[in-house]
Amino acid sequence: MNGRTNEHRIALFLDFENLVTNTGISASNFDLQPSLDRLLEKGKVVFRRAYCDWSRFNDAKLGLHRFGVELIDVPPSTRAGKNGADMRLVIDALELCYARESIDTFVIASGDSDFCPLAYKLRENGRTVIGLAVKESTSPLFVNACDEFIYLRTRQRSEKGDKEKEKGRHGAAEEAGHGKRARHGREATGRGSKAEGAQAATSSGGKAPAKSDVPQIAREVVQNLLARATGPVNPSLIKETIVRKEPDFDESEYGFATFAKLLAALEQEGVLRRIQQGRQWYVVGPDADLAGGSEAKTKKPGRARAEEEDELESYPDPEEDDAL
């Protein structure tokens, strides 16, 4: 291997025509940066290739060159205009798998179920497979064939999300102003209006989702792991198990900025309890008995919320945990 087991080495393969055909993304506004940022959080992207008939997508060439993507031109090979880009991508990926053992993660940017056999073969050879595509144009079969799946955001979805966030901020400001005016008139009413305003701002901004927003898959995994566990469970193991069951799982789609905040919501529901051992936080059952000389300490009810959230962020990433 590459001698640095704590750093993943990633190969990125883009079926470009699939990403910009009937997906809401055009060749001219295709932006690889957000997806590349996600991959760089996992490791080093050492191989980058995009396949298609580039005579049809000249607008995308400059942007992809800027990110160091090698463009493989695959002209149409049939009268119907179907090209061999898929086949070329599969051959190159398998060749790289057998020739470069140091590359342990393969990213297939496509929503086409034709790549399922490739994903199976790569995983059979001990590689991690990550899918990358637009959600509305992705085959569920390919999602399930991958270890993890990342969804590209179309421009419309991004703009809609920005508008909702802006609306939430304006709503919070208006409610806060209303609470201040009410407080001048009648203190009790002012307190009520302020509480209502905070509640409305929270629901609009999506910062503290209701209990119903916690995905069922998270509850099931936590309950199953805790039922079989003989000691505290590392939060990274919970996240890894959820992703294995649902490769496209993303806590942000349920309103949680981080996985730690999702665990906090589960703790409020009484599904689990978080404890600290040394500098690391772990998860135990709500009725776990930690007596008997254990140095673990539970959260103090009076602790400030901001300090609590800072501590939650100390959970290690699953990738780092695997390396250990």
Image (spheres, rainbow, N blue to C red):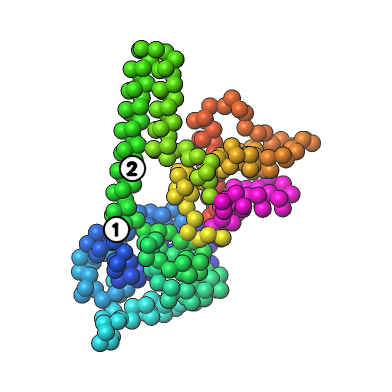
Residue 132 relative to residue 243: left or right: left
86 above or below 63? Answer: below
Q: Residue at x 42, y 76 (%)?
A: 114
Instruction: Identify the magenta region.
Output: 216-244
Q: Residues within 10 Å of mark 1 (few under 14, many from 20)?
A: some
Q: Nearer the viewer, residue 203 or 300?
A: 203
Q: Position of residue 152 (x, y in %)?
A: 36, 58
Q: Residue at x 35, y 27 (%)?
A: 175
Asked whether residue 165 is drawn in magenta, I would say no
Above or below for 84 versus 172: below
Looking at the image, the residue that sits furthest to the bottom is: 79
In-front residue for pair 173/317: 173
| Distance between mark 1 and mark 2 Cα atoms | 22 Å
Under circle 1, the secondary element is loop
Q: Is residue 236 magenta?
A: yes
Q: Which residue is mark 2?
A: 164
For the residue carrying disc 2, how many other residues have a C-alpha within 10 Å: few (<14), some (14-19), or many (20+)?
some
Q: Earlier in the sequence, mark 1 or mark 2?
A: 1
Figure disc tally: 2
Q: Position of residue 310 (x, y in %)?
A: 51, 35
